[in-house]
């Protein structure tokens, strides 16, 4: 077991049963011209988050930890978006934009498009798990839970965009499924004001898990290797 410098208190984790979860690091959410940028949401923190996650996944792979990519995306015919009977049809940012701006249909978060693709700096590698989801939580309507359990994974280190939406949604579901959720707080950024990120950090530390910094994780992995 490895002791981590987490908040609100230090905990011990089994890194051999751990995975880095990279949530929605797609052009849609981290690049100029992507969905969030088109929606007028500030993405200025994205390059910092990309750099932090790159360091984390490199260290995780070198240490033999699992790397899991979650990506949000719809089929070109939107048959998996929920339709007008689903709140997802109206509230999810890409769906809202495509419904209100018909010229964007088939261009935002659509499988096979630039918007859907993971940013170049974080392209998944052979051996990484990649799970496509159609709702905020990576556990909703996917085989994520079974893939993790088959590999004996119990501890999940969360990173990505947006802290207050897909990251928090997946982290909460992980908690409900008895995984140990840890948010690497400087490797995630919010959609909206800074207060949204801070609220998720508070929620995690108070009710759903633990938080730590990128360097805390890197130090722990380095100690394990040595």
Image (cartoon, grey):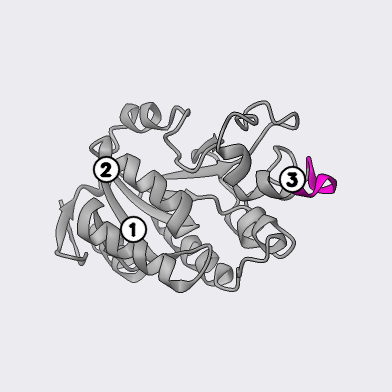
Q: Is residue 105 magenta?
A: yes
Q: Answer with the quarter of the image where residue 217 lies.
A: bottom left
**SS for callout 3:** helix
Residue 178 or 14: which is nearer the viewer? 178
**SS for callout 2:** helix
Disc 3 marks which residue? 98
**Disc with the residue nearer the chain's start (2 vs 1):** 2
Number of the front mark, 2 or 3: 3
Query: Which residue is rendered at x = 43% and y = 64% of the image?
Result: 187
How far apart are the two marked residues, 3 and 1, measured between alpha carbons? 31 Å
Q: Is residue 219 left or right of residue 89?
A: left
Disc 2 marks which residue? 175
Query: Which residue is rendered at x = 49% and y = 41% of the image?
Result: 128
**SS for callout 1:** strand
How far apart are the two marked residues, 2 and 1, measured between alpha carbons? 12 Å
* Residue 93: % across, % down: 62, 50
Residue 73 or 80: which is nearer the viewer? 80
Which numbered disc covers residue 183?
1
Q: Residue furthest front?
A: 85
How far apart are the two marked residues, 2 and 3, measured between alpha carbons? 33 Å
Highlighted magenta segment, given as a residue range = 99-106
Residue 206 or 126: which is nearer the viewer? 206
Q: Is residue 100 magenta?
A: yes
Q: Answer with the quarter of the image where residue 46 lies.
A: bottom right
């Amino acid at each position: 077991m490895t002791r981590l410098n987490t908040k609100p208190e230090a905990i011990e984790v089994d890194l051999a049963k751990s995975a880095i979860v990279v949530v929605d690091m797609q052009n849609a959410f981290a690049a100029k011209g992507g969905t969030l940028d088109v929606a007028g949401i500030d993405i200025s923190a994205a390059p910092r988050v990309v750099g932090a996650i790159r360091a984390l996944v490199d260290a995780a792979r070198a240490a033999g930890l699992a790397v899991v990519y979650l990506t949000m995306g719809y089929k070109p015919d939107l048959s998996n978006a929920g339709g007008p009977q689903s709140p997802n049809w109206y509230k999810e940012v890409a769906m809202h934009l495509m419904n209100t701006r018909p010229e964007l249909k088939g261009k935002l978060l659509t499988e096979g498009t630039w918007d859907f693709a993971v940013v170049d700096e974080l392209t998944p590698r052979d051996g990484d798990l990649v799970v496509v989801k159609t709702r905020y939580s990576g556990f909703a309507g996917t085989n994520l839970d079974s893939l993790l359990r088959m590999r004996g994974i119990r501890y999940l280190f969360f990173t990505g965009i947006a802290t207050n939406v897909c990251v928090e949604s997946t982290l909460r579901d992980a908690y409900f499924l008895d995984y140990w959720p840890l948010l690497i707080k400087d490797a995630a950024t919010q959609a909206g004001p800074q207060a949204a990120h801070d609220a998720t950090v508070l929620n995690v530390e108070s009710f759903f898990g633990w938080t730590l910094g990128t360097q805390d994780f890197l130090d722990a992995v380095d100690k394990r290797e040595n």
